[in-house]
Image (cartoon, helix red, strand yellow):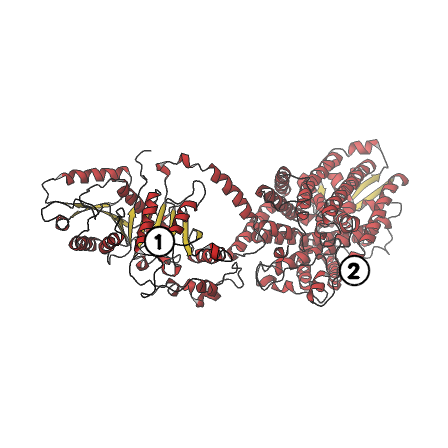
Amino acid sequence: MSNERTPLVTSGVCGLAVTAAACGVELDAAASESGPGTPSKDPRHLNTFFGVMVPTILSMFSIVLFLRTGFVVGHAGLLQGLLMVVVAYTIISLTILSICAISTNGAIQGGGAYYMISRSLGPEFGGSIGLMFFLAKVFACGEYVLGLVEAILDVFGSDPESSVPAGVRVLPQGYWYTVLYSSAVLLLCLLVCLVGAHIYSRTAFIILLVVTVSLLSIFISSVAVQPLDFVIAHKGADNQTLRYNASYTGFNATTLRNNLGSGYSLDYSTNSVMSFATVFAVLFTSCTGIMAGANMSGELKSPSVSIPKGTIVAVFYTFTVYVLLFILVSATCDRTLLIQDYGFLQRINIWPPFVTVGIFCAALSAAMCAMIGASRILHALALDHLFGLPLAPATITSSSGNPWVAVVYTWGLAQCVVFAGQLNAVAGLVTVFYLLAYAAVDLACLALEWASAPNFRPTFQLFSWHTCLLGILSCLVMMFVINPVYSSGSIVLLLLLLLFLHYRSPTSSWGYISQALIFHQVRKYLLMLDVRKDHVKFWRPQMLLMVANPRSSCQLILFVNQLKKGGLYVLGHVQLGDLDSLPSDPVQQQYNFWLSLVDKLDVKAFVDLTLSPSVRQGTQHLLRITGLGGMKPNTLILGFYDSCTPEDFFLQDSAFCDSSIGQGSEGEYNFGVDLPSLQAHFPPVRHVESPRWLSPEEYVGIISDAIKMNKNVCLARYFFQLEGEGKDSKVDGSERTIDVWPLNLLQPDSRDYEDVCSLFLLQMACVLNMSNKWRNARMRIFLNVETESSDQGWVVNEETFRELLRKLRIRASIKIVPWDSVVQHHVQPNGEPPAEPTRALSEEFLSAVNCMLMEHSSQAAVRFLYLPRPTAQSQQYLAQVEAVTNSLGPTLLIHGVTPVTSTDL
């Protein structure tokens, strides 16, 4: 999976370290990779218990276990409290299934959720969610620090109403003192993280033991401690002291019954009335550590076994502890004690320091874990160069691989969070950010499942798209239940980040799930596109443009892009050669160059190349096999076969000039094709003396083949003179004119303006008139009539033609062109027209037709002419068409064979 670690830019290094045990970040990996001569140890040494269960349990207990259990039960009651626990654990359980599926489908690197999402959904979504997850970790760090300070002040804070001796309660209290103490704790966390997270990771198991002992003391105290009464005092409005009588009753049925229902009231820490949403937001912060074990895949002996097993066991264990603790406190403590004293577990313990030490260890552990985890996510984002210069310093690491600059970034932002002053004040925002990140993980797993990619084979199978979808919906619903303002703001921020990253257009080689989903959907809809259900009302042009050398064909490529009207557009090219005499297929190596050309020209076209002994055979191959199902070319477009010296478009367009190299984004991933190699790949344009790859007979044979295969044919001449088709052009067509000559000018005796070919000609002109750069162009249709003839039927024909245009909804002005003087050159000396259509037309007639076209259409931007069927005499046929269109300017000669117009609704 080395390609998964390829950065967005070629200069970056994306081999990331994984955080310490509790946060899932390996710290020594970067150091071991820093020098090629440094011997590296196998990092996979952790088992399920130490690698997954310990960090996950510690992250999920945090401070809620000791400081907010009474808050939840007191306000929500036992029944709603248990409902909150069930809802919270249902949401995280659904997300855990997705985490286990993704993490067992391949090893993940540093960055945790960011790495999972970015490598699954692409850099735009991964980068935006990664930054949101970083912010969630930062706010969580601030929240844990505030919780720790709250616990410290409960023990050591000065309180004249307290019965505890004043010698212990020496710390002054107040908002700014809280900020000061929080800053000191944050500074301690910063120092530990700067020295190295390995100090913390080595003590994780000891911390878990301390927390477990504290928990056991709580359960033992519930039966060992006798009923107690307390007087709790708080500072109220205007510095008034509010006193509350509270009691610990021990196990009591009356106490349990009184605590079953909800009793939402004023929160003494924030002076705001609580509700289901605000209490749930506080509770859910205990569920934000489920990814700690999944991030350890790089250090686990058997990730595919340890991650699902360890995470699920840890979640089940913490769920059991929370349920038992909720039942215990609701049966032993009255509601006043639960609501008015968040640290009540210390009051009712057989030895209060048990709980005090447990709170300090849990809170400090969670704060350092959040700071370490956030810094590693930021470091991963910086290494991927998603946000450019602002995060560039975060790539700096110490000699041991510790990203100390990212740690300082995290500390600075967490310092801003502690100015909130109260844990409950930031709990809602933390929960919303985490829910959004969990929804993104579920979305990543859902996308992988729906894409049905053969390589998505996770060893963990206990999930389906139903669980992923339910996880997404539950996360989004709970976000808005908790706080609609925060939820809306976070989603808006996510969308802004998505737009920013999309505007920067980071291109990676990680693989895009969007491509897999698009393939899946396109295949499904292609099967539904039944050619037997085609109807002329919904016909659209589907073009195959044969290109010999793009250097001389760029204007034509741009023009056909305007002509396609939402249909299929394919650039075809024939490479001359025989595969039997070659060691490998030379065509496969050329696709990237042609696709880069399509990107440069900004046209919506596919590319199809083939290898063939002759251009004619190669064109037959492409006409037969290009496209799939109902999306196959129905129109072949060829450049004109003449002796004009082609011009090199690459020398005229700034997009292909060397001076424009620096204008792109620095280090932009270009799929191995930079501008110099693109220019070098396509050969110089043909000189006059250069031999041609195509004979006149073969060229006319291609036209005949296409007509036999029931394909419409267009010959494009002089399109190198057409300007204003580039993507930077501001042309809107208001000064352009489209001229249409629907009569077969080489067979004037036909006099048929409504045959299939003429109607196809009108349709193509109308399609061009509907495109962006031609929408305001004027379309003129020229009707050639013999006014001096004794047959005046042309007047009736004109009215009939006007009626036809009205029925076809074609807006165009009709110009009557008398051409008696031209037709007289067509008849034989005896006054009769040539008996054989293949008979050579006189040079006088061809010159007269050309003069007529020059007279009436010299100022047109483009001309549409009727292309007659090829004759057996290829040289003669080409000479006649060339003579008629000589020096006209951009001209499209069209021969249509399929009905394309409809007058019915």
Q: Position of residue 728 (x, y in %)?
A: 39, 58
- CB contact under 8 Å: marks 1 and 2: no
Can you see residue 75? yes
Q: Position of residue 209 (x, y in %)?
A: 84, 50
Between marks 1 and 2 in the image, the one whose residue lies nearer the viewer: 1
Looking at the rendered image, the quarter that the C terminus falls into is: top left
What residue does disc 2 label? 199
Of the numbered discs 1 and 2, the one sitting upstream in the chain is: 2
Q: Quadrant of residue 461?
A: top right
What residue does disc 1 label? 559
Q: Nearer the viewer, residue 555 or 709?
A: 709
Q: Is residue 159 above or below residue 672?
A: above
- Dot 1 amino acid type: Phe
Find the distance from the CA under tag 1 to the CA under tag 2.
Answer: 66 Å
- Dot 2 amino acid type: Ile
| Local crowd size for mark 2, using a 10 Å CA cut-off: few (<14), some (14–19), many (≥20) | few
Kind of element beneath mark 1:
helix
Give the residue at x 10% y 49%: 829
Answer with left or right where residue 750 lies relative to residue 31: left
* Label of residue 348 in the image: none
Q: Position of residue 96 (x, y in %)?
A: 69, 43
